[in-house]
Amino acid sequence: MSSTPNNALVIYKNQLAHVTTVGDKKIHINTADGQTVKVRHKDVTILHPGPITTLGQLKPAPAAILDVAWELLAGNTVPIVDIAELAYEEFTPQNALTIWQLLQDGLYISGSLDEIYVHTPEEVTQIEQDRAAQAAEAAAWAAFVDRLQANQVIDDDSRYLQEVAALAYGQQSKSRVLDALGRQATPENAQDLLLQLGQWTPFHNPHPRRGGISLTTPDFDLPALPDEPRQDLTHLAALAIDDAGNQDPDDALSWEDGRLWVHIADVAALITPDSPADIEARNRAANLYLPEGVIPMLPPPATEQLALGLQETSPALSFSIELDDEGNLIHFDFTPSWVKVTRISYAEAEAKINDATDLLINQLHTIAQTYLQRRLRQNAIELNLPEAKVAVNDETITIRPLPPLRSRELVREAMLMVGEGVARWALTNNVPIPYTMQDPPLEPLPPLDSLSAMMNARRFLTASQQVTTPKPHAGLGMPMYAQTTSPLRRYLDLVIHQQLRAFHKQEPLLDEAAIVTRIGTANAMSGELRFAERQSIRHWTLVYLHQRPDWEGEAVVVDTRRNRSHIVIPELAFDTWISGDKHEPDTTVRLRLQDVDLVQLEAFFQIIDA
């Protein structure tokens, strides 16, 4: 026997249908839109067994008569037959149709045909209010979209644009607003719309947040500096050489009877393994250096107590180093210390190098040069590329080229000596630490005697890596190396300091597994940090150009491909591709700014002279 009567009134895919032919397995139905469909019995729901001849004969029964049934049944769940018989005294196709239409509307009743829930007056009122609110919101949305298409917004539109900002920051992947405008939901399109509408200005830098980087300052209580023996080195002149205005000096240099002292802020004295501040620094990986300012990985009190030269005397971990005439390390040791530091800028140190009577700075310069020459003999790769310091103060952007000063080279070489010394010491004493290594270039490099050669050499250099077994660092020309000298700024440097202090105090060391975990956690974020810094510097450089639409300046061609040239603007430390006449590498050309695209981080120039 079939389960569906012939000439029954049924529901198929949420629309009315009339059963015209019944078979054992399938039935034919005519739908409300005039189609004849062959379906299974289970594909339809019987609204009324009929009989009816056509859907056209059905006229809904008066709905007003349902009021009595509604009052009597409010709050109850009943089948459709009970409602029909109470309201109309009989169950017919016409009144079944009426009740089904009310069920579809959902104001007075809800549920299924077998279990219809009759709403209470309070529920009806709430549904009516919700529908009115939805209608008002739909009208408001339509008006908002109209304004968007006219490139206009009002204050109330900010609630709709919040999702656009979230997309621009990379915090979500969809946007109803961009969908309404027929634009792909990408962070760049979201940023472009916000700029177009005037909701963001060029001074809005989305790149750090787009990388998921915290822009808050860590806030943890730190313990007092432990009362422990420290070697008194305050009798030595100690120079902290850094950029003018630097706020977190963490290294200083001294000279004593043929021995170089490198003093590093003793951060591990306060930040111990797995303390709250240590875990937070691990997750941040390093300081975030933006043109707008620095977001530290450690709470500010760490810098206040530990940075060298901010107090009259500073706690340090001091490394003593001696080299032979060939630049090889012949002595290396370290000790907790007290130092008295004088802070000077790179420019001031450069002037002292030029003064032959300044014995301290010239002794430091001599040992640095000895070590550099050894690294060069070991095939160190020196890329002297243009550098610039980009700084933002309110809406004032300054870009200051950083010349290749010998004083910068001096400090760099001293830090590398410590890195090699620590690596050798850790290997000898079986102390697990993160070593830094770099594989050789993918291809042999040509002579690095021009800007174009140095720029193009970057394509063949591999990224440095942190490992637990010492390996050569090809770029530095060193047999082993461990970044050690910035524990205020880099987390893995802090880990090394924690290991050094633990060994010195004969306390338990972190094992290799713990070092691997710390390397993985820090590396997961450090790539994002460096990318955010590069993108931010490029953003603010472009804003600088945006403020100067008549900018002209010199560039050096470093590569050519067909009718495009890769150029570097030394005064901005900025590179891009331009179209036009082909020029030989290392040709100097004069450019005029044509346009700036902050969204795509591009600037467009015209060559006006070669």
Image (cartoon, grey):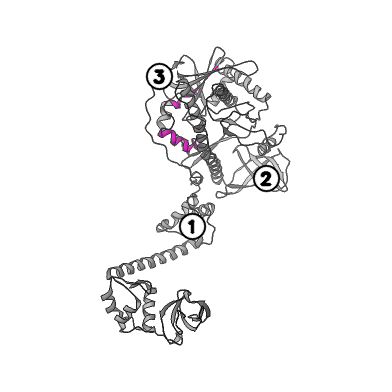
Seen at 47% across and 82% down, the residue is 19
Give the amino acid type for the residue marked by disc 2 in the picture: Ile
Neighbor class of circle 3 (other Cα within 10 Å; few <14, some 14-19, many 20+) is few
SS of the residue under disc 2: strand
Decide which of tag 2 and tag 1 comes sooner along the chain. Answer: 1
The residue pinned by badge 2 equals 608
Give the amino acid type for the residue marked by disc 1 in the picture: Ser
Decide which of tag 3 and tag 2 comes sooner along the chain. Answer: 3
Q: Do the residues labelled 1 and 3 touch (CB within 8 Å)?
A: no
The residue pinned by badge 3 equals 228
Q: Nearer the viewer, mark 2 or mark 1?
A: 1
Taking the view exactly as shown, the residue that stands out farthest to the top is 257
Neighbor class of circle 2 (other Cα within 10 Å; few <14, some 14-19, many 20+) is few
Decide which of tag 1 and tag 3 comes sooner along the chain. Answer: 1
Q: How far apart are marks 1 and 3 (CA)?
A: 58 Å
Magenta segment, which residues? 260-288
Q: Percent x, y for residue 455? A: 66, 37
What number is the disc on residue 175? 1
The answer to whether 306 is drawn above or below residue 465 in the figure is above
